[in-house]
Image (cartoon, rainbow, N blue to C red):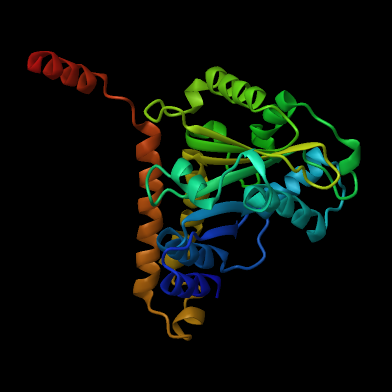
Amino acid sequence: MGTLLISKIREEYPDRMMLTFSVFPSPKVSDTVVEPYNATLSVHQLVENADECMVLDNEALYDICFRTLKLTTPSFGDLNHLISATMSGVTCCLRFPGQLNSDLRKLAVNLIPFPRLHFFMVGFAPLTSRGSQQYISLSVPELTQQMWDSKNMMCAADPRHGRYLTASAMFRGKMSTKEVDEQMMNVQNKNSSYFVEWIPNNVKSSVCDIPPTGLKMASTFIGNSTSIQEMFRRVSEQFTAMFRRKAFLHWYTGEGMDEMEFTEAESNMNDLVAEYQQYQDATVDEELYEDEDDEEQYEE
């Protein structure tokens, strides 16, 4: 239903930026047995029709509620509170004035080095439970440290298992852009091995003057990391295990779908995983640069 809507909107408004917040199946918590089929068919459409896709995961959200917020029985309201904080942070620059503003198109230009690789990990700081916002106040360095923490990521993939192609940090509240830039530079210098070296200046920051309700400062993190392939791999393995046995396939073929659609979706997702792996392993070819320098000297 969702992907049909996206494809129709894409046909009707081809020049509009399409951003989705997509909930992917969790590794341990499963609602329905056909989740791997639904996720694979959805990714097939999201690769083609969405411009930016923020990946969310119920299990990662539950982990944040248990570990960070110390909630014993989190409800869907608590999970939605976390998601709404992130959604608000991503779109705040469209709605409020700021010193360093950005919009969805600017975000896409800075975050997507290759058109198909538009699946992002999102995080938020400070993480608060409903009603406790007013008791939390953090400085810019503390916000930055929390924001990049793998425990704050809202999808079940660990950024330490891959490398960042690009990232974006959106700060809200009264703060100096100089301090924000310094903190971003610090993160890159300290963790340079987690960033690909062949995309220079690959962390974008924006500052919006209006903080969220109940907080003095907040920050939202969006990362285009190759480690997101962990999620696609996991779904792909579950998909293959079921599809090989043709399990539950009759529910889909009975509604008019074709087996070929499943095969296409599977190969598209495997291609996506291969692309992420390719760019994770890529390095700067120093010899290539040396050859170019030699040619320039020769021309002089």
Residue 165 versus residue 46 in the image, above or below: above
Find residue 120 and report its horizontal and vertical position in percent: 53, 47
Q: Indicate left or right for 279 with 162 as reference.
A: left
Give me the residue at 56% from left, 59% from top.
20
Identified at 40% across, 30% down, the residue is: 199
Q: Nearer the viewer, residue 71 or 296?
A: 296
Where's residue 219, x and y in %? 69, 38
Residue 202 relative to residue 158: left or right: left
From where the camera sits, is residue 6 visible?
A: yes
Number of callouts in the render? 0
Q: Nearer the viewer, residue 217 or 19?
A: 217
Residue 32 lies in quadrant: bottom right
Q: In x, y percent, where is residue 262?
A: 40, 69
Is residue 27 visible in this depiction of the protein?
Answer: no
Q: Is residue 83 above or below residue 282?
A: below
Q: What residue is rendered at 73% in x and 50% in y?
A: 85
Residue for point 17% across, 21% down: 292
- Between 45 and 109, which is closer to the camera in this rendering? 109
The quarter of the picture where the C terminus appears is top left
Q: In the rendered view, does 11 fall on the left or right side of 221?
A: left
In this view, 289 is above or below 4? above
Q: Position of residue 221 (x, y in %)?
A: 62, 40
- Where does the N terminus fall, quadrant-wise? bottom right
